[in-house]
Image (cartoon, grey):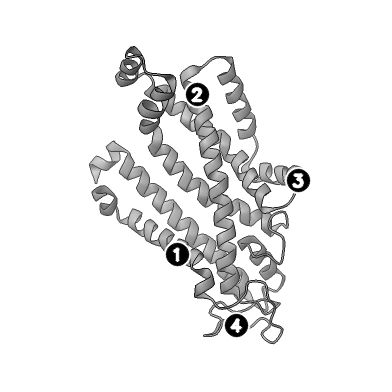
């Protein structure tokens, strides 16, 4: 904790991320407006005391829609990345420790998925799976699963040759015990960093899919759908597209700084320099 608090960028990232999470969780209490109810007497109202982020073409409060939309985007991204980390990390650990033809097959499948750009793969998966929040989370999980599998495998291949792992083998510990108690704790740092980065870019993937109409469907709010709506009347009401884009940028900044802080705290070599 001393190393974390000594890292100013990590503290800034934690503060930004915490603020975003607080606003997303407390959204219904922060704004008294509904994210979907239209108000035709307040169409495209500029930012004001009553509507700090203005209103959209249906008179809906933009701040309220951003708060609810960020909740959807964040939940989808977190769910997809955590599933990818669990399945991919487990596959990478097992393939590195056990080896054999099954490990080779898993890694070749991971290489195949790696050959596609992330957003192109997401578009393909959405066409195959169909629209919807659950399918976006599944797409994010499939995109990041080979990344976590490759990362866990490469780190485990190094750690399994360490003396303490060989000592655990000589003591007769089970494979599960060695993987969970000897190898996993020593490769956790890069996995945690990748989880934070994955959540950040998962938000971008969800927003991009919703922006193209392949994700969350109107009138349900999402950062991508809000930006897509704002694009239609950007010259008349630039605050809709601009403020929703700024929200995504702030969330990404906080998560990236936080991931760097986690890396510095959990890496002994970097921690020694703080």
Q: On residue 94, which mark appears?
A: 2
Q: Residues within 10 Å of mark 2 (few under 14, many from 20)?
A: many
Q: Please identify the residue farthest to the top as the structure is shown.
A: 170
Which badge, 4 or 1, is on the more N-terminal residue?
1
Of circles 4 and 1, which is in front?
1
Provide the residue designation for mark 4.
46
Contact, mark 4 vs mark 2 (Cβ under 8 Å)? no
Q: x%, y% of residue 162?
A: 33, 20
Q: Which quadrant holds residue 41?
A: bottom right
Q: CA distance from mark 3 to mark 4?
A: 37 Å
- From mark 2 to mark 3, how far is it between C-alphas? 32 Å
Task: State which tag comes first along the sequence, 4 or 2.
Answer: 4
Q: Secondary structure at mark 2?
A: helix
Q: Nearer the viewer, residue 169 or 84?
A: 169
Residue at 48% from the left image edge and 22% from the top image edge: 96
Q: Which of the two labelled residues, at mark 2 and mark 3, occupies the earlier sequence position?
A: 2
Kindly identify the residue that appears in the image at 50 percent across and 73 percent down: 29
Secondary structure under tag 1 reads: helix
Mark with earlier residue (1, 2): 1
The residue sitting at 56% across, 62% down in the picture is 70
**What is the secondary structure assignment of the residue under circle 4?**
loop
Q: Earlier in the sequence, mark 3 or mark 1?
A: 1
Q: What residue is shown with label 3?
A: 127
In the image, taking residue 187 as reference, residue 67 lies left or right, namely right
Element type where label 3 sits in the image: helix
- Does 167 sit left or right of 145 as displayed? left
Residue under label 1, please give it: 22
Instruction: Determine the CA span between mark 1 and mark 2.
Output: 37 Å
């Amino acid at each position: 904790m001393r190393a974390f608090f000594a890292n100013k960028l990590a503290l800034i990232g934690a503060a930004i991320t915490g603020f975003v999470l607080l606003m997303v969780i407390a959204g219904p209490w922060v704004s008294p407006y509904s994210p979907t109810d239209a108000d035709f007497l307040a169409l495209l109202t500029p930012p004001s005391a009553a509507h700090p982020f203005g209103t959209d073409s249906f008179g809906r409060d933009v701040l309220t829609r951003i708060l609810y939309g960020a909740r959807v985007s964040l939940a989808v991204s977190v769910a997809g990345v955590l599933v990818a980390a669990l399945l991919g990390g487990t596959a990478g650990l097992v393939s590195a420790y056990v080896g054999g033809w099954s490990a080779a097959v898993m890694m070749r499948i991971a290489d195949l998925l790696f050959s596609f750009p992330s957003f192109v793969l997401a578009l393909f998966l959405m066409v195959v799976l169909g629209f919807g929040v659950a399918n976006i989370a599944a797409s994010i999980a499939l995109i990041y699963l080979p990344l976590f599998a490759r990362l866990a495998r490469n780190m485990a291949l190094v750690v399994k040759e360490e003396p303490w792992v060989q000592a655990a083998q000589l003591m007769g510990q089970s494979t599960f015990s060695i993987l969970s108690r000897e190898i996993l704790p020593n490769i956790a740092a890069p996995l945690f960093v990748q989880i934070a980065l994955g959540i950040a870019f998962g938000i971008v993937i969800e927003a991009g899919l919703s922006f193209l109409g392949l994700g969350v469907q109107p009138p349900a709010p999402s950062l991508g759908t809000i930006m897509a709506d704002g694009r239609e009347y950007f010259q008349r009401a630039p605050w809709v597209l601009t403020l929703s884009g700024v929200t995504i940028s702030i969330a990404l900044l906080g998560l990236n700084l936080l991931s760097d802080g986690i890396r510095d705290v959990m890496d002994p070599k970097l921690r020694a320099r703080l």
